Image (cartoon, helix red, strand yellow):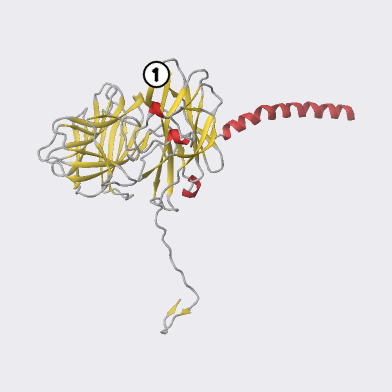
Amino acid sequence: MQSKIQNLKSKMVLPLFATSYFLLPLLLFLATPAHANRLLTTGAEENNYTATMWTSNNGPTIVTSPVHSGTYAFQSANATGNSRWFRLTLASTKTSGTLYFRFYVNFTSLPAGTIELLRDRSGGSTDALSVEVDSSAHVVLHNILSTTTQTSTATISTATWYRIEVKHVIADSPNGSFELKLFTGDSTTATETLSITGEDTLPTNIGIFNFSNITGAPTGGYTVSFDDIAINDEAGSAPFNDYPGPGKTFLLKPNANVTQGFASSTGCTGNGHYDCLDDLPGTPDDATTYIEDSGNTNYDRLNLTNLGAEVPSSADIIAVDVYARVGGDSTTPRTMKLRLWDEGGNATEGPDITVNMNGWEILQSSEHLVFNAAAHTKANLDSFDVGCQGVLATEVKRFSAIWANVEWIEAPASSTSLSITGGVTLTGGVTLQ
């Protein structure tokens, strides 16, 4: 009888052991933090357009005043008859779902005629949505497909930062809609909300976003600055699947080496790999200083600069969005990815980055690494690291610059109340009950 019991125990233990053997790697895999989804985070802190994040036409300039946060902002002025915009193009166009835009604007001088602040379009450049400011300083929400407009009763003033947030539900009539919320600065209460509902908001698809989409110049001219732009869609995980809300941007870049698994170009100094990749703010120098690898196991890990004095210790940290300038030495397929380590050394890997080219390029909208930083503090971020790793072996993969845009906002002011009971007597004979 005893031998039968022991035999039964052994039959039970083996399956349990086998289950644990296969389950443990799965649990370890699931425990690895996953990157979040956001289409764009920027505050112009790159101090560059086309070598970092955008395409542009008759480029708006980058200025140091006025700014909503950080050091830089985008600025557009009287276009003198020329089309002027800076543009994000999605890696894959959308035929359904929802887009959420946030941007801040500040007018130094108001337009004498209608100008556009934002236009979203199909991949074939058929227009859908336009956000405008008219000659009376009203904000206009415009469905270009149906020609429907909604105009604010509120007017905007010069030398004031306004936040505009827009929701685009992509669908044919009667399921498509637009919504615009106008805020003063970082307020969480909208000054006004404009809506267009039950209409066609879908051309063939949606895939191009133009800011400062100026196609001509109103008489008298204007000057408008843009700052702290964010774009979400419905595919993201919270909070990146809704209106972005108020936010500011601080740029971090590599400033020390932890692990140097890639090789460096001959132009890099004796400071090591971080000195090859710390080109921003400014224009990445591409072939002059970069790191490269042709394997899929080596990786670079680099310390980051700290958040500056502008960011208070109590700030709410919203996101860390990591970008890079990347390249290759031929059109043969090759793949790599970005990595981010938090203060506990936990690594998050970004999506695959494919560079089938002999040269350099910016990341597509689907290739940067977005990290939900809501559970982290300013002090935590001082211990974050950034880096990169190859995915597809044998082909050369290059990084010319790496940086992280940290989205943050001041923590809400806490209110305190004083409750006194028990008949406390103050001087002067006043008693609190």
**Residue 160 screen position, x and y as percent:** 24, 49
Outermost top residue: 332
- The reply to whether residue 19 is visible in this rendering is yes
Tell me if 23 is positioned left or right of 320 in this view.
Answer: right
Query: Could you say which is closer to the camera, residue 70 or residue 167?
Result: 70
The residue positioned 42% from the left and 51% from the top of the image is 315
Give the answer, above or below, for where 324 lies relative to 397.
below
The residue positioned 16% from the left and 44% from the top of the image is 110
Query: Could you say which is closer to the camera, residue 50 or residue 247?
Result: 50
- The reply to whether residue 363 is visible in this rendering is no
Tell me if 102 is positioned left or right of 422 in this view.
Answer: left
**Residue 413 screen position, x and y as percent:** 39, 57
For residue 106, what is the image quadrant? Answer: top left
Tag 1 secondary structure: strand
**Residue 11 screen position, x and y as percent:** 78, 26
Query: Could you say which is closer to the camera, residue 36 or residue 153?
Result: 36
What kind of residue is marked 1?
A: Asn
The local crowd at label 1, few if under 14, some if 14 to 19, many if 20 or more residues have their Cα within 10 Å, is few
| Quarter in which the N terminus is drawn | top right
For residue 83, what is the image quadrant? Answer: top left
The residue to which callout 1 is attached is: 358
Give the answer, above or below, for where 371 lies relative to 353.
below
Query: Could you say which is closer to the camera, residue 326 or residue 14?
Result: 326
